[in-house]
Structure formats: C-alpha cells, structure tokens
Amino acid sequence: ARRFLFFLLLLSGVSGWLPALAQTEADSIEAPPPPKRELRGMWIATVENIDWPNQRGQAPEQYRRDYRRLLDAGQRAGLNAVFVQIRPASDAFYKSDLEPWSKWLTGVQGKAPAGGDDPLPFLITEAHRRGMEFHAWFNPYRATMDSVTRRLAANHPYRQHPQWFLRYGGQLLYNPGLPEVRTHITRVIMDVVRRYDIDAVHFDDYFYPYPDPGKVFHDEAAFRDFNPDSLKKLGDWRRQNVNILIHDLHDSIQSAKRWVKFGISPFGVWMNKSKDFPQGSDTRAGQPSYSNLYADTRLWLEKGWIDYVVPQLYWSTNFRLCPYPVLVKWWAENHFDRHLYIGHGTYRMLESTRSDTTWRNPRELPRQIRTNRATDGEAVGSVFFSAKSVLTNPLHTTDSLRQDLFRYPALVPAMPWKDATPPLPVTNLTLRRLSHYVTLNWQSGPPAADGDAATYYVLYRFEPTEASTPNDPRRILALPRPAPGFPATYVDTTAVPGQAYAYYVTAVDRLHNESRPMRVITTGQQSAELALGQAPGGAPRPAAPAVATQPAPVTPRPSIRLNAPADKPEASAPFSKVKIKEKPAKKKGFFARLFGGG
C-alpha cells in the first residue's frame, strides 16, 4: 500500500511533501535515472519588466541583486540555462552604437545606466558562475510596444530610417520585406556575438505580426519592389523574407564564433493537419506559425539553419484544441535531429484562467516533463516561461523539480554538427584524505586538436562494488567550473570514514563534449592518504612514499569499459560518445519507461 501511495505521489509531482518514511522507500525503489543530458532553462523577460528588472530606473546595484535572485532560484531548481531578453524592442540592455538603451532598464529610452554600467557582461558572468548557458534573446522585428514615436530616442533607427517601419496593431514594426531591414537586424545581432561571451542567439515567436482582425499589414510596396524571384503569392514571399534572415544569420554566427548556437522558440503549432496540411499536427490552433506568422520553422530545422527549437507548448495535457502530448509527439517527429526543447507555459499556474484549468493542478508540469522524457531521447530539454514562475514556486512545482525530476544535475546535450571533438583529459589529478574529508585537485589538459580547452568538469563518485558508468547522473558529485586558467579543487565532505571510493574526473568543453576520464581511488583504511590519478585501465601510479597507504582493491574495482587495450589508455575511446539519443532495442510502455521494468 505504501509503495502504491508513493507512486501516486511521484506522478503528482509533489514529492517535496513526502514523509520521511515514504522518502526512504523511494530510495529503495528508485526509478531509472533521469537523463544525464538535458537542457533545463527559463526565460527572463525584460519587456514591460515582466521578470527583470523589477522596476525601471533602478540603480545597477539593485538590478544586479534582483538578477542574482532569479539565477539563484533557477540554480536551486536544477536549471542549466537562461534565456535573457536583451533586445525586446529595437533597444538594448547593453552598450550599443546601433540602438538606444532600453527604457525598461533605465526608465527613459536612450538614457544610460548610472555610472555608465554595461549590464551584459555581468549577466553572462553570473550565469556562467552557476553553470548556466547564456542565451541572448532578441526580438527581431518589433520596434515599439506602441505607435507613439515622439518618445523614441534620438539614436533609434526610426529617426534615421522611418521608411523601414510599418504601423500595425498599435505597434511600430520593422518591415521584413526590406533588404536593408535584414541587414540592420543581422548587424545588431552580430555586434553582440562578436563583443560578448554569449552561448547562443535566441529568437522568440514574433516574426510577421500575429493577425489583428480587420487590419491589414501594408507591405504591398515591398512585395512589388523587392521580389527578385517574382513570387506570385504574398504568403510565399513573406516566408522567403524570413527564411533569408534565418539562413544568413546562421551563416554569420557560424563564421564569427563556431561555438555560438542559434535557436528559435516558435508558436507551438507549425500547421494544422485539419487545414489540408498532411505534414501538420492533429490540432486546431487559430494562428499556426507557417500560415499566420510566415515562420517556416520546420524548414529551418530540415535545412540545418538553426541548432535548436523550443516550441511554445503552453497548453495543458487536457486542452482540447491543442493537447500537449499530441504536439510533443509531432515535434519529436519533425525536428530533423536538431535539438528539441519544449517551452512550458508555467506562467499559467499564476493565472486564474478558465480556458485551461488543468494548469491549476500541481501534477501538470511534472506530467509534461515525464511526457518529454518518454520520447526516447527526441525531446531533450524544457524551458519555462517565465523566470517569475520559477522564483515564486506556484503550486510548489519548483519544489517538485528540485526534489524529484531535477534532483540530479544534467549536462547540456552536445551538438556534434557544431563540434564533435572532446577536450583532452585532466592532468595532475591528486587525492588527499584526512579523516573523512577527501580533497581532489587537478588541472586542465592542453587544448584539443580544435583548440578547445576545458570549460568545466564532471566529478563522479563510485563505491568499489558498483560498476562505474558515465551515463548515470546519480553518481555525479559536482560540476566544478573554476575560473579560466586556474586549477580545480573540490572537497568531498560527504565521504564516509573507512569507506573506499573511486572518483572519476572528466573535462567538458564549451559545447559540452566530454573527455576521457581520469580516476583516483581512496581505500579509506588509513587516517591519511595521498593518491595520484590514472587513466582507467592504465598502470597504477604510486602514492607518495611519505604517506602510508594501502593499494586499491583489485577485485572488484570500478571500471569504465573503454574500446582500447588496457596498456594504451591514451588510445581509449571517448568516455561519453557524441550521440544525442539512444534507441532501446525494445520500445517499452509509458509507465515502464518512467519506473523501469518490462
């Protein structure tokens, strides 16, 4: 009965409320480990100060504190990426010679922060310190949130090029059909790519505007004058304009910094099958992105113009027109081996909406994440809109993530089409043990063949009787990220006195390729030990003679199976293969994939 109760509570996503007895039993019947590689992120929206800064015109000290608070909440929840809106409406949250400072930062468009502060290096550094990727979020075509131009700064592009813009739906928008507009948008984004240490360029769902009933987007002149292929249909021409921007921007990013990713977060429905689109999803969305926003995300994935897609699946499992499981399945079948992360509408738990009441159930978000994980490695991440819903912990769902679904750390999935070369192993790995404290020290190896060095490390810990594996995140002790050029140190304060352990350390590069491991063993039988690291399968390296130690046990001992002779550890195969998904030989049922078994 207690086991049945535990499973019910686990499915409900409220494991944070389990009594101690149920939690003890949970450890004994633990589900298969969560994926070791999974992107877990949140959007930090700055437009209208949705998430950050809390108020316009704050002093840098205050908006820095508020930003740290958001990141700390994300870190506690187990997140490893943030998507920060740095250009919400042809304005900037960074120093720019091309566009004005954002009014949502300083209170007045064009006014610089106090003391000439440039927030962006701080935003990036704080994310990296917490082991989070920084995705710079741009809105490409929106110029204002209203149509009032008298308050625009003197250096707003509208002042120099009013012909670039159209008024529609109470806003000022760039005209996507103008080549000069595409050139300007690309220039703005590439300025950030070149000057700042971002990990990715990110677009949201706003391309051509969402249709406003009874209103017309008057781009007829551009259709007439800038249509080199003489396309007959306005919709085809509009899609071509967006395609050109996406294709050219992809190439520009790749040429400037090959490690910077490019991703899009489109409206959740590409096209409805019910509209005579056999490739579409079995949904009835009102404004599909292909036909209404002229954003052919599926084509961009097929052509490899983007590295990841985050469809905004903000509907619940039970929403009749666009059920969450139906759309996850469609995107899992249509992402063309580029990364698929799912955008979750966690803000809806903060609303009293009547249109989708399932979001009031604390089980809904955990259920959605389990649905993602049941796609056999197709959906490899989740991003939450927005950060406020992570910080405020609605329905205790953030607690549920922290204590259950995101209980163990996860590495961001690698992108072999961008970089398939792992870094070289760490060097000078040493272990010192006094009492039950174990201190590990190591240094980065030399740059790999592609010039990449370690960005961070993975530290695993195994007991001597268990088989070591690089794929179980439950054995990850930490993901240290020392400052560049400095040696790494980690103190394991949880080691049990007298207990033997094997520690494995791997290096990970900027695009999350993982090196071969180095291993060091402590027997726990002496009051003080000193041990030196070795490659698994290599000849043991003796400890310092001044410290009495016992040899590591030979049988059984932790081992990672490498595809190379034991006497040639340097020729070993990579510890973590560059592979995005692994298909099981036999497809298991939904609950079997959640809890194991046949």
Image (cartoon, rainbow, N blue to C red):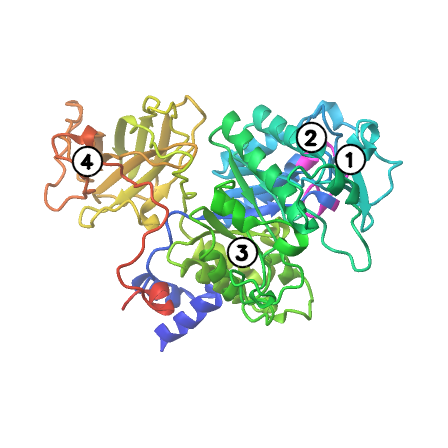
Gap between marks 3 and 1, in whole Å?
43 Å
Gap between marks 1 and 4, in whole Å?
61 Å
Q: Is residue 60 magenta?
A: yes
Q: Position of residue 90 (x, y in %)?
A: 73, 36
- Residue picked out by circle 2: 184
Q: Residues within 10 Å of mark 1 (few under 14, many from 20)?
A: some
Mark 3 vs 2: CB contact within 8 A: no
Q: Earlier in the sequence, mark 3 or mark 2?
A: 2
- Residue picked out by circle 3: 398
Q: Is residue 397 visible?
A: yes
Q: Is residue 368 left or right of residue 170?
A: left
Gap between marks 1 and 2, in whole Å?
10 Å
Mark 1 vs 4: CB contact within 8 A: no
**Label 3: element kind:** helix
- Residue picked out by circle 4: 536
Q: Quadrant of the N terminus?
A: bottom left
**Label 1: element kind:** helix
- Residue picked out by circle 1: 164
Mark 2 vs 4: CB contact within 8 A: no
Q: Quadrant of residue 127?
A: top right
Q: Is residue 434 magenta?
A: no
Of tags 3 and 1, the one toward the viewer is 1
Name the residue: 38% across, 40% down: 478
Name the residue: 40% across, 61% down: 374
Q: Which amino acid, by three-letter code, is at mark 2? A: His
Gap between marks 3 and 2, in whole Å?
40 Å
Mark 1 vs 2: CB contact within 8 A: yes
